[in-house]
Image (tube, grey):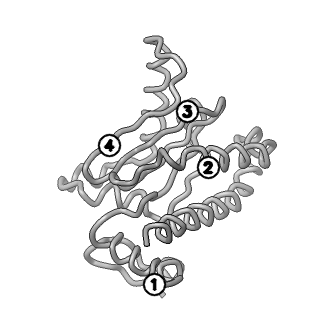
Amino acid sequence: MKEANEDSKVEITSELMDFFCKDKNWFELGSRSLRFTAPPIIGFFIADKSGTIILTCELFDGALEYFIKRDIKDENTKTNFDIDLIPPFICALESFSDQICIQNLAELKIKGTNIKIHTIFCFSNYTITFFLNPFFKIKPFEEMICEYFFKLFEEHKTKFEQIYQPSTRELFYQIELNGRSWLRDFIYQQLLTKD
């Protein structure tokens, strides 16, 4: 059964509640996230080098749009916001850096007071864009994160090579679920290390 949280405009599903009620730490994270601040990592995109989104992984369905849109005051801007434009913009910046001879661009960071975008370019065919709490320091975890993605791309190499074939799209659903599980476990570990 679904009900809308009027303050946050996030649909509270049983999946979301099960996730946040995993234990005391998750519940505290959930209540803070829905009312005050973003969790350490909200989600990520994997895009090809042209900016086409291949895979989206969010802490919960709608998390990226919620945490990005919630501070937009202008209703017209909020209504017309298109999250799918972010990866092409990031890829255009990567391409521009090649044009002006920035060598070995490994990452790009855009930080505001409400959200931080951290992009990893170290993969030859893919760009990974993370959406973070602006106060979360991802640098100490980059090696572990890159290792996860190297394994992911290697393990599912054939699927990624055939991504544009219609039959392959359904196979990515399981990869997205596994990515969500990895993301939740990663954040959960961050909560445990803070205590």
**In this figure, what is the number of numbered marks?**
4
Give the alpha-carbon distance from disc 2 to disc 4, as whole Å. 22 Å
Q: What amino acid is found at the position of numbered circle 4 in the picture?
A: Lys
Are there few (<14), some (14-19), or many (20+) residues within 10 Å of tag 4?
some
Q: Which comes sooner in the sequence, label 3 or label 1?
A: 1
Mark linked to residue 111: 4
Secondary structure under tag 2 reads: helix
> Circle 3 — which element?
loop
**Answer yes or no: do the residues labelled 1 and 4 have beta carbons within 8 Å?**
no
Residue 128 % position (x, y): 55, 42
Q: Position of residue 56 (x, y in %)?
A: 55, 53
Most foreground residue, 16 or 33:
33
The answer to which of 75 and 10 lies nearer the viewer is 10
Which of pointers 2 and 3 indicates the residue nearer the eye?
2
Residue 144, disc = 2
Q: Earlier in the sequence, mark 2 or mark 4?
A: 4
Name the residue: 69% across, 57% down.
Answer: 175
- Gap in Å between the C-alphas at discs 4 and 3? 17 Å
Q: Earlier in the sequence, mark 1 or mark 2?
A: 1
Residue 121: assigned label: 3
Which residue was labeled with disc 1? Answer: 24
Is residue 192 visible to us here? yes
Nearest the camera: 48 or 94? Answer: 94
Q: Residue furthest bottom?
A: 1
* SS at badge 4: strand
Image-quadrant location for residue 85: top left
Quick check: 163 above or below 40?
above
